[in-house]
Amino acid sequence: MLSSCRKALYTLAKHSARSFQSSAMALSRFEYVKQFEQEEKLLPNCWVVVRIDGKGFHRFCNVHTFTKPNDLDALQLMNLAGMTVMQEFNEIAIGYGQSDEYSFVFRREASVYQRRRDKLVSYVASLFTSAYMFHWKRIFDARSVTMRYPPSFDARAVLYPTDENLRDYLSWRQADVHVNNLYNTTFWNLVASGLSNSDAEKRLQGTLASDKNEILFSQFGINYNNEPLIYRKGTILLPKSVCIAEKKQKLIVPIFDDLIGDAFWVKHPEILDKKAKSDDAFELGEDLSQPVVRYQLEVHTLRKAGMKKLETSMSTLQTDAS
Amino acid sequence: MLSSCRKALYTLAKHSARSFQSSAMALSRFEYVKQFEQEEKLLPNCWVVVRIDGKGFHRFCNVHTFTKPNDLDALQLMNLAGMTVMQEFNEIAIGYGQSDEYSFVFRREASVYQRRRDKLVSYVASLFTSAYMFHWKRIFDARSVTMRYPPSFDARAVLYPTDENLRDYLSWRQADVHVNNLYNTTFWNLVASGLSNSDAEKRLQGTLASDKNEILFSQFGINYNNEPLIYRKGTILLPKSVCIAEKKQKLIVPIFDDLIGDAFWVKHPEILDKKAKSDDAFELGEDLSQPVVRYQLEVHTLRKAGMKKLETSMSTLQTDAS
Amino acid sequence: MLSSCRKALYTLAKHSARSFQSSAMALSRFEYVKQFEQEEKLLPNCWVVVRIDGKGFHRFCNVHTFTKPNDLDALQLMNLAGMTVMQEFNEIAIGYGQSDEYSFVFRREASVYQRRRDKLVSYVASLFTSAYMFHWKRIFDARSVTMRYPPSFDARAVLYPTDENLRDYLSWRQADVHVNNLYNTTFWNLVASGLSNSDAEKRLQGTLASDKNEILFSQFGINYNNEPLIYRKGTILLPKSVCIAEKKQKLIVPIFDDLIGDAFWVKHPEILDKKAKSDDAFELGEDLSQPVVRYQLEVHTLRKAGMKKLETSMSTLQTDAS
Amino acid sequence: MLSSCRKALYTLAKHSARSFQSSAMALSRFEYVKQFEQEEKLLPNCWVVVRIDGKGFHRFCNVHTFTKPNDLDALQLMNLAGMTVMQEFNEIAIGYGQSDEYSFVFRREASVYQRRRDKLVSYVASLFTSAYMFHWKRIFDARSVTMRYPPSFDARAVLYPTDENLRDYLSWRQADVHVNNLYNTTFWNLVASGLSNSDAEKRLQGTLASDKNEILFSQFGINYNNEPLIYRKGTILLPKSVCIAEKKQKLIVPIFDDLIGDAFWVKHPEILDKKAKSDDAFELGEDLSQPVVRYQLEVHTLRKAGMKKLETSMSTLQTDAS
């Protein structure tokens, strides 16, 4: 790192007076500080999970009057932000979101930013954040909820050497949403029925999953298994070839399913093995109505319509873009 | 890392069947994957610089019709985003922005997130991004520039062991803006005078700083030294006690000054030595008109006015907030 | 890292005078420096290769008159040192030595020193070095070669996420010994035949493997494929259950074989899969005469013979030992 | 890390059959595994402390009948090993040894192995180990103590950003030897006086330094402050210019002194500031009799005497050495 040439620079920077004639000279005099950058590169051939987490979202939810225990719009906004990240990186094999967190799984062979940790972690956090804000109006204008202050997310990168480790990671997150959602659903129903927050907490202390299921059913007539899948299982995002108007098109598709068992992995073999991609187009079914899908189809339609109109301006644009 | 207890979990996870009764059991079965998180902590007692960089801002500037070589509004928006970051972290000693980048210098003793690299780097990137979007309308509504797509920034953390290294880092960034801005100012004036981009490039090939100054002066009547300081020196942000309406108040203050020479550091000793904070309030002078200052004063006035009105709602809010 | 408690210590250390009454106080005053230790832990569930490399062994070989291109005794000494390392760590699945280097492959689940990088790398280097010196006399006394100065080795740790990556690593080292040994064998035969070093070098410039084989055969009557396996393939060390005097015993066994093809891995499935250990004892065959084997059998015999005699002293020893 | 060129290699390695014609081809096919090496480089401009620690030295001391609480010969052997390390690296500013540990402080600007962590840590551990074994006979032959099994040491690297942090590190180690040695001296005197180990332990539980001093004085007539400095303060090693036979010569000099107070640092300013080296030769005084000094003078004398005799052979040697 301190090659003789750079050491010379360093010595120069230290001993020369702090005034200078030429700006280029100044630049080179201080450039030695670049050596202090330590660019960790993530181990090759491992799965890279980048997980986004909301900062202080308890307060953010309150200020923006999100519904408890689950706000469907807020979850859809998270999904739109997740979709934007996956559109940007074609090396993401699967995305998984629940509550105020989102996990993005980069393929073993991903070479994005040469696998530099700082770049990857910060860029995913930044892009997720800006997409979250960008799509806000689309989701919340109907409810007249204005953003009161900017939200933010942190991120971390975690490496998994084997497919089994990766599946266990995703299972861990999905088991987590199950445990939390069963608790929260029971808790907020108790509160809605008149208990104070602390009384509801006491009521649930030490209860098992079966106890909570029982409270929900006997006291509130709720069969937990009939609760929406998006609340119980979170949202899986997969890049799929979808048939739209008889043409195949690449879409980021939301899926609400159990991913702990084997069935999911048999149904979507391309997640673990890129080459396993089937030629069959993916059937959207009722997911056509999901905001993530509707948004992509709208953009697609707009692009097609505007193709001619945009031709001149876009070509200029592309020439300028780096 | 693989303590016997956790190893037991791991073995359980590997060998037990992939079906389970209790959700809590499932959670604990997969929890071993947490061990794969490797939380690097930044070396204590070093200055920590987190530098934000715009991703693909060449294109972003073109799409949003930013003025060349400098767009004052776009720079002020960067400053508002920088201000937001500095309001969030009271351990930042100095911020420095130029072009589409911003550096935040955390004090040697900063303990934010226990100095965890991933958290710090991603959160600063995310907060800067959301603040940039949040303040967009304040700056660009007057020009009727709508945001066409979400911008993003990456970030990196760099450690500097000595005060001298830190000063040299900041000098490096300021020398960089000088070199680039002199070039860009000359380049875009040549283009404005009728040269093609490539002809302007050729014209400047191999020229020294003095040559560019000469071109600007003789051909365009521009004395480069009279160009606005914000273009030539970038923006320095410092937390200062400012006297407003005869009351001292903490503000993030923008300063346009040379920071390569010693004078700046003599004038602001608290940057390098927290205990050197003077009791004298900082004089804002003409910087009162800077958007960063005006924004903070507005918020301050609003808060004061709304104090009574907000009292009830805020108290509720604070109880809920974590 | 800088918890409030430790920060208090730190402040104390900085501001208190540099004199003190009690030694315990002094100790605690300076203890904050422990926080600067950054203990990297190697990613779980990856293969860990620790590779030892001789420092300046060109000179060491010359000073100690090692035979060129291969000194069988020197290689056997390396093997004895490798054996000692493998006796110390039962989590090593395979060792591989060639020239002045040795690779030790720790199992995916190895928990040695909690996988702390510095500890593992330095201890393996140290133990290999001391074993090399310890066994020196056993090998070189017959040749009356005294050690003139202490040898040393460096070490590095490399992680491999998949079995395929690990096999490719070992194949890389074995392909390397092949390329080097064919070159060296031809080179030193040319030199022995009267060519100067530089003439021999020129003669070999640009030659393919087939050319070197041809030179060896036509000029020196050497069929390269008949050269000893230990020169052409290096030494593989495996922990095996061996039948000795009708009792099974654990030994570190040297194997001279191709490990690039699949056959080797079919024959020794326990390397990649610990549970695949067969119940059959390993047949030593002609490897019984290898110094590594002879040494272990000698120690075994000595231990058995001395059992009674040592009983008293050993029990004392074991009580004292940590 | 996964540049397109290397990725091609990687793909080749994965998909091609496991047989090959040319050895060079094989080598290149597997070479992609080199990318998995992650070479951490130590932050520039920080002090680098490499600390060596004996592995299982409790047992090693017992087996080799070292005297308790301090074995002067064993400490001198540690010092000889420390000396060898300091002769090898001219970038070490100071060495400090106590008990079975040794710290080596590399200068801020040290560029050894480009500051690669693995290399530095492992090589220092290896060299210290081999020097310890190499000098064993010189120290222990007089006592007829044969080495029964190879000793080993681990090592770690720790970075210190400021001179104050570095001084505090060394103070920490010296305060540690004080605390331990006062305890051990009292403990072993109690045991020598007839107490069992556990009774001596109980006797000392909860005692302060003053209590231990009192026990030593009243019960055993020992004034702790008159105990040898090497036991109470450890050994400091410094590279010094020494006047020998009226010629200046570079020696590694052992110093037994307090390094917690300022006096030591005023006396040896070159430790913290390389340029502060005085022109005056260092006065050895009574340290002339230290084994570390005697050894270096012997080697010096031998070299001088043998200069002529060695001329021929050495020149050959130097030509061969890499």
Image (tube, coloured by chain):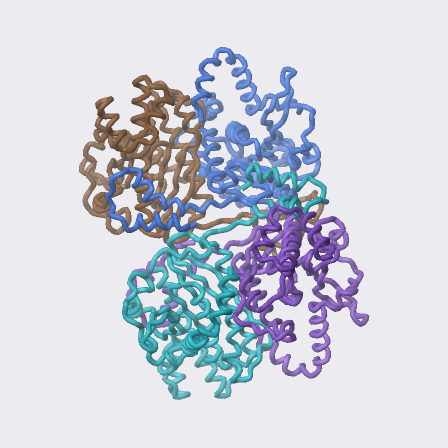
Chain colours: A cyan, B purple, C brown, D blue
Q: Residue at x 79, y 64 (%)?
A: B285
Q: Residue furthest top?
A: D309
Q: In the rendered image of this protein, does residue B257 appear above or below residue D216?
A: below
Q: Is residue B127 left or right of residue C215?
A: right
Q: Residue at x 70, y 64 (%)?
A: B252
Q: Is residue B208 left or right of residue C202?
A: right
Q: Residue at x 65, y 67 (%)?
A: B73
The spot of residue D154 in percent (x, y) is 46, 40
Q: Is residue B11 left or right of residue B235?
A: left
- In depth, the one of B319 and A322 nearer the eye is A322
**Residue D208 is at least partly visible in this image:** no
Q: Kindly indicate the quadrant of the structure image that contains residue C74.
A: top left
Q: Residue at x 62, y 24 (%)?
A: D287
Total marks drawn?
A: 0
Q: Is residue C260 left or right of residue A106?
A: left
Q: In the rendered image of this protein, does residue B52 appear above or below residue A40?
A: below
The spot of residue C46 in percent (x, y) is 37, 51
- In depth, the one of D177 and B78 nearer the eye is B78
- In depth, the one of D200 and B88 nearer the eye is B88
The spot of residue A95 in percent (x, y) is 41, 67
Q: Residue furthest front?
A: B194
The spot of residue D240 in percent (x, y) is 62, 27
- In depth, the one of A242 and A320 nearer the eye is A320
**Residue A286 is at least partly visible in this image:** yes
